[in-house]
């Protein structure tokens, strides 16, 4: 197990190196001259050159990349062009809302989607199965921002059950923190629930047709034991894989969801940085999201050996 873990960790290093190269290249592959765009139409040539020097565009690409990687390894992501604050400080100020939203969404999606998928597989061909799959198709079809606006209109504006927007830190109380995240988590988790439920159903149907399931039934095992102890455990690898892959959906959806519900998280920070062409902030946030996604997939790879001891690479 230790050797397998070391190999998987080492395999992430070239992946992160490629990601870092792409993120750093955003300055160079963006259309137009970044310094001129940031400076604006009224800027003088001296202003443009000063911005070019601050961005390092007057030096060779590889030299700048090496310096940037060296600073990243020291925890320095640069300084925002517009606020003059360190990018790490801006990320620290915004990371709590995004992390809270993503964790709550994952917990909601997993706790709802897996039982629904198991239920649909158990009741294959019945109205329950068709209803679950219909909801899954609906979850895939409706965009996140549409779901968000509908939920905000019904539960916040019409019924006045929940806040329409904003974020409250957990330090101010659990319920104020939770009530601000219920609607965003449901809106963001719709696609995630649909994805996990469909994969769970398909995998469970395949497992339930295996010989050892028929043997368990012949021995008199209860339906709950067959579904959750025998079948779901053996169907866990594809489900866990989809949960890990779905983190990319959460990262992309968080940007939209935070904009709809005015949550001051990393998604809003990314949108604001893109609109202002604040390249150091864009690079820092994209690199952080990429690093989190790589770590999640590494954790998924390591979990494979727990669910299926036969897996060894």
Image: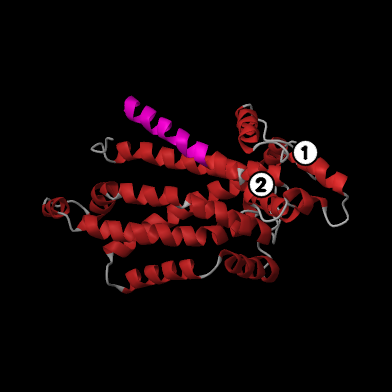
Q: CA distance from mark 2 to mark 1?
A: 13 Å
Q: Is residue 304 above or below residue 136?
A: above
Q: Are marks 2 and 1 in contact (CB under 8 Å)?
A: no
On the image, the x and y values in percent for residue 72 come to 62, 32
* Residue 7 drawn in magenta: yes
- Decide if residue 96 is in sight here: no
Span highlighted in magenta in the image: 1-18
**Quarter of the image where one finds residue 5:** top left
Query: In the rendered image, which quarter contains the N terminus?
Result: top left
Q: Is residue 114 magenta?
A: no
Q: Residue 194, percent across and down?
A: 43, 62
The label shown at residue 214 is: none
First reached walking from the N terminus: tag 2 or tag 1: 2
Q: Nearer the viewer, residue 291 or 179?
A: 291
Q: Residue 284 location, x and y as percent?
A: 64, 41
- Which mark identifies residue 27? 2
Please name the residue shown 55% across and 67% down the image: 143
Query: Secondary structure beneath disc 2?
Result: helix
Does residue 36 appear in the picture of this structure? Answer: yes
Please identify the dominant SS of the magenta region. Answer: helix
Of residues 226 and 44, the one drawn nearer to the viewer in this rendering: 44
Q: How many marks?
A: 2
Position of 296 compared to 54: left or right?
Answer: left
Q: What residue did someone put label 1 on?
A: 53
Tell me if residue 70 comes above or below residue 307 in the rendering: above
Q: Is residue 28 left or right of 115 when viewed as pictured?
A: right
Mark 1 falls on what kind of element? helix
Q: Is residue 215 above or below residue 143?
A: above
Q: Nearer the viewer, residue 310 or 180?
A: 310
- Classed neighbour count for the residue bearing mark 2: other residues with Cα under 10 Å, few (<14), some (14–19), many (≥20): many
């Amino acid at each position: 197990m230790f050797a397998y873990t070391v190999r998987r960790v080492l395999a992430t290093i070239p992946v992160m190196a490629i990601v870092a190269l792409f993120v750093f290249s955003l300055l160079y592959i963006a259309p137009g001259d970044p310094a001129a765009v940031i400076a604006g139409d009224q800027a003088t040539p001296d202003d443009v050159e000063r911005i070019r020097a601050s961005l390092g565009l007057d030096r060779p690409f590889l030299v700048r990349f090496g310096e940037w990687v060296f600073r990243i390894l020291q925890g320095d992501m640069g300084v925002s062009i517009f606020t003059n604050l360190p990018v790490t400080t801006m990320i620290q100020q915004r990371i709590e809302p995004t992390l809270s939203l993503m964790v709550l969404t994952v917990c909601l999606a997993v706790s709802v989607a897996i039982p629904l998928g198991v239920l649909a597989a158990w009741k294959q061909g019945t109205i329950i199965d068709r209803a679950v799959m219909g909801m899954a198709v609906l979850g895939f079809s409706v965009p996140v921002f549409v779901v968000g606006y509908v939920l905000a209109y019904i539960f916040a504006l019409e019924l006045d059950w929940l806040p329409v927007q904003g974020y409250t830190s957990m330090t101010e109380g659990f319920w104020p923190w939770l009530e601000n995240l219920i609607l965003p988590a449901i809106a963001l988790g719709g696609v995630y629930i649909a994805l996990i439920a469909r994969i769970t159903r398909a995998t469970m149907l395949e497992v339930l047709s295996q010989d050892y399931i028929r043997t368990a039934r012949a021995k008199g095992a209860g339906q709950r034991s067959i579904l959750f102890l025998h079948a779901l455990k053996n169907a866990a690898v594809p489900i866990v894989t989809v949960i890990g892959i779905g983190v990319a959906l959460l990262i992309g959806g968080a940007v939209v969801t935070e904009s709809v519900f005015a949550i001051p998280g990393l998604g809003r920070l990314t949108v604001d940085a893109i609109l202002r062409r604040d390249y150091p902030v864009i690079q820092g946030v994209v690199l952080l999201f990429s690093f989190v996604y790589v770590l999640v997939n590494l954790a998924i790879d390591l979990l494979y050996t727990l669910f299926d001891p036969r897996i060894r690479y």
